[in-house]
Amino acid sequence: MVLLAQLIGALYGFLAVIIGAFGAHALKKRFTADQQKSFETGVKYQMYHALVLLMLGFNLNMDQAHERYMAYCFIGGTLLFSFSIYGLCLTASSGRKWKFLGPVTPLGGLFLATGWALLLYHYLHNFF
């Protein structure tokens, strides 16, 4: 699980740079200001959680269930949150918005929040 967190963290970081550059340059003229802002939010959250996954992978053994669930929440939440935003922006800019992705974004956010809550639990559990 440690290696998985590190690999996915590195992959998400790499993709955040590529997707961010693509959005800032190739898609800038295609997106409205709101779409550009939403796309950038997806990239930022992806990069933040790529870094979190790397830190978890280097600092935790992932031998406790809540540590593994935390990593899974960050992995799945990032995929659902950021990539649904990319899909919504790209399809809306082409005039064929995939509305089914709308509810996916908050579900991803729920997984991300759960991952952070598990991280808080981890530190509180070890502190007290």
Image: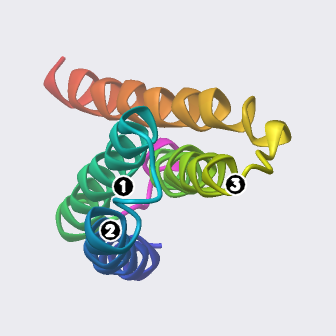
128 left or right of 13?
left
52 left or right of 68?
left
- Secondary structure of the residue carrying numbered label 3: helix
Three-letter code, disc 1? Gln
58 left or right of 53?
left
Determine crowd level at label 1: few under 14, some 14-19, many 20+ residues with C-alpha closer than 10 A. Answer: many
122 left or right of 42?
left
Q: Residue at x 38, y 80 (%)?
A: 11
Q: Which mark is residue 91?
A: 3
Q: Position of residue 90 (x, y in %)?
A: 60, 57
The image's colour scheme reads rainbow
Q: According to the image, label 1 marks what residue?
A: 46
Q: According to the image, label 2 marks what residue?
A: 16
Three-letter code, disc 2? Ala
Q: Are marks 1 and 3 in contact (CB under 8 Å)?
A: no
Q: Residue at x 66, y 46 (%)?
A: 92
Q: Which mark is residue 63?
A: none
Q: Residue at x 57, y 27 (%)?
A: 110
Q: What segment carries the magenta color?
A: 62-67
**Which of the two discs, 1 and 3, labels the residue nearer the N terminus?**
1
Q: Residue furthest top?
A: 128
Q: Position of residue 77 (x, y in %)?
A: 55, 45
Three-letter code, disc 3? Thr
